[in-house]
Amino acid sequence: MEGPEVIINVACSLDGVIASNKGALIFSTTEDWLRVHKLRNSVDAILVGVNTIIKDDSLLTVRYVKSRDPPPMRVVLDSKCRTPLSAQVLEKQESIKTVIFTSNKCPEEKKKKLTDLKIDVISVDTKDETKYLDLEQILLILRKDFNIKKLLVEGGSAIITQFIKFELFDKMYIFYAPVFAGTKNAKLLYDEIVIEDIDNTNTFNITKMEKLDEGFLLTIKPQKDDK
Ligand SMILES: NC(=O)c1ccc[n+]([C@@H]2O[C@H](COP(=O)([O-])OP(=O)(O)OC[C@H]3O[C@@H](n4cnc5c(N)ncnc54)[C@H](OP(=O)(O)O)[C@@H]3O)[C@@H](O)[C@H]2O)c1
């Protein structure tokens, strides 16, 4: 069985900044927010990294439109169980499920507190190459054990970078706000060491470009789809 269809969504400045190192910068406009919440409503689960939970205290719920029933599941990648017990993503478990993927670095005591809150805490392998949780394993578990057919990846920088780097997505939406944010100490859309040769990197198909409010929305797909 293959993993779910993966869609990445992000909002950034013209210079590819998604947040400052202190936390969220709101680049989405009203129309873009509405698009994002409709997109959330079209998927089975929404995934973020633990830093986004710590910095933004994200709810990961569908708002501004009537939510599907059941609402999309919430997924946090958190190898050391750093998710605060007060995080909003842990609330309302009776109606919106949250799953935390972790590793053997999650302290047992914290794991128990999370499971007491009815959170599913699932240990997976850490990849030697990246030192991060194994995304392919996570995708397969989401499909097999939770019947997640469509997954929305929302951030932040480290998570999006890993999904792009290993081309683990089917479609990506990038909303560009008409501002420059400055990249020093910024969280970037793609946070990797700069390439030295443009021929040595993956290229993507730009499948759509549309004006949205004052910004524009780009849709890209990996070229693997052409092979
Ligand atoms: N503009 C937007 O659209 C948007 C959307 C979402 C978030 N954001 C911003 O993004 C910022 C946070 O970005 P961030 O880069 O600091 O953190 P992040 O991507 O939210 O979380 C990264 C952390 O997740 C954990 N993780 C576990 N498995 C991973 C994997 N396979 N790949 C990557 N990370 C993995 C790691 O922590 P452990 O090692 O502890 O497991 C890692 O440090 C926030 O300030 C938020 O405002 C912006």
Image (tube, rainbow, N blue to C red):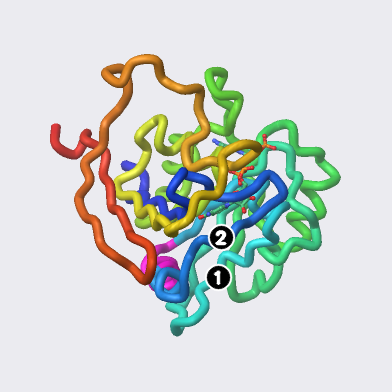
Residue 216 in percent (x, y) is at 33, 60
**Amino acid type for the residue under numbered disc 1:** Thr
State the extent of the magenta-drawn residues as a range. Answer: 36-44
For label 1, the crowd category at 10 Å Cα-Cα, with few meaning under 14, some 14 to 19 and many 20 or more, is: some
The C terminus - image quarter? top left
Left or right of 66, for residue 181: right
Q: Quadrant of residue 38?
A: bottom left
Q: Is 37 a magenta residue?
A: yes
Task: Please name the residue shown 28% across and 53% down the image.
Answer: 219
Expressed as whole percent of the image width and height from the top left, the position of residue 84 reads 78, 54
- Which disc is residue 200 wearing? none
Q: Which of disc 2 and disc 1 is earlier in sequence?
A: 1
Label 1 within 8 A of ligand 1 by Cβ:
no
Query: What residue is shown with label 2?
Result: 74
| Residue at point 70%, 69% (across, down) | 91
Q: Observer-nearest residue: 52 or 84?
A: 52
**Looking at this rendering, what residue extends furthest in the right direction?**
109
Q: Is residue 57 left or right of residue 222?
A: right
Identify the amino acid type marked 2: Arg
Instruction: Specify the quarter for ligand 1.
Output: top right
The answer to whether mark 1 and mark 2 are in CB contact below 8 A is yes
Measured from the top left, where is residue 186 in percent x and y?
61, 41
Q: Compared to 58, does 138 lie above or below?
A: above
Identify the disc placed on residue 61: 1
Q: Which residue is located at x 21 percent, y 55 percent? A: 208
Helix, strand or loop at mark 2: strand
Q: Position of residue 67 (x, y in %)?
A: 46, 79
Q: Residues within 10 Å of mark 2 (few under 14, many from 20)?
A: many
- Quadrant for the N terminus, please: top left
